[in-house]
Amino acid sequence: MEFVVFGMLFIVVYFLIKKLIVDNMVKINRSLAKITSGNLDTVVDVRTNEEFASLSDDINSTVLTLKRYIAEAAARIDKELKFAKAIQHSAIPMVFPPYPAHGEFDIYATMDTAKEVGGDFYDFYFVGESKLGFLIADVSGKGIPAAMFMMTAKTLIKGYAESGKSVDEVFTIANAKLCESNEAGMFVTAWMGILTEEELKAVSGGKSSQVPGINCPCCGKFIPITITDLLVQPRIRCPYCLLVLNINKK
């Protein structure tokens, strides 16, 4: 008889514990699984007794604090990216016309990045009293890494161009510098020319059968006349062919 009473009591206690504790813990674990998977809008609401109500409130409070921290971090990153975009845009010519005193030519450019910052860029500057250098380029990838590599490439190319080197020398030396410590394997696609009243000197390291061009008489490499596929990339250190186009004056 005692054994039967003990067995019945055990069963009652088991179902009571299961209802009051185990089932509630299962509900809480389900909610926590949703939260840890990224659904921070999940609300834990188990209030069968004071302990579980307090646990639910603590979990909800922690999630709210986490959401606030995430929102603050996102706002801070947003602000920093906007600041980085302003810095990047300030590094390229943005005032037009750039040379009001030079009425013999006009130039205009604009840049719209896919993200707040990126690797696209252009540049132009005088490399002598009557020589205008201009550049259009695109760094591999997007975002902060591309923007940083872009600034490095832009600075190198401009520095060598303003030192008086020819465009093929500029790209050859800049390429070698960009290859140094380039563990990320990034590269820049670019096209550069130096324009005078008599001629345009440009460099290209790419090839394409879809654009007009000429075959280099010294190496046979195809030289496109339009802007296309000029690669300045790691582990490619061949010299760049110089293309010279004479300007016909009427």
Image (cartoon, rainbow, N blue to C red):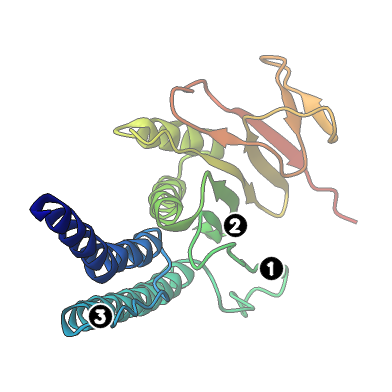
- Is 34 or 87 nearer to us in this picture? 34
> Residue at coordinates 36% horizontally, 59% vertically from top-left?
33
Q: Are marks 2 and 1 in contact (CB under 8 Å)?
A: yes
Q: Secondary structure at mark 3?
A: helix
Q: Position of residue 61 (x, y in %)?
A: 24, 82
Q: Is residue 146 above or below residue 81?
A: above
Which is in the foreground here, disc 2 or disc 3? 3
Q: Position of residue 196 (x, y in %)?
A: 66, 52
Say left or right for 121 vs 65.
right
- Is 171 or 148 nearer to us in this picture? 148
Say left or right for 230 vs 81.
right
> Where is residue 67, by image quadrant?
bottom left
Residue at the farthest left position: 2
Q: Is residue 147 above or below residue 236?
A: below
Q: Of the two numbered discs 2 and 1 on the same chain, state the one appearing first in sequence.
A: 1
- Is 238 or 60 nearer to us in this picture? 60
Which is in the foreground here, disc 1 or disc 3? 3
> Residue at coordinates 37% horizontally, 62% vertically from top-left?
30
Residue at the farthest front position: 1
Q: Residues within 10 Å of mark 1 (few under 14, many from 20)?
A: few
Q: Position of residue 16 (x, y in %)?
A: 23, 68
In this figure, which residue is indicated by the disc labeled 1? 107
In this figure, which residue is indicated by the disc labeled 2? 132
What amino acid type should be assigned to the residue bearing mark 3? Thr
Q: CA distance from mark 2 to mark 1?
A: 11 Å
Q: CA distance from mark 1 to mark 3?
A: 53 Å
- Numbered label attached to residue 178: none
Q: Of the two numbered discs 2 and 3 on the same chain, state the one appearing first in sequence.
A: 3
Asked if residue 128 shows in the view, the reply is no
Q: CA distance from mark 2 to mark 3?
A: 56 Å
In this figure, which residue is indicated by the disc labeled 3? 65
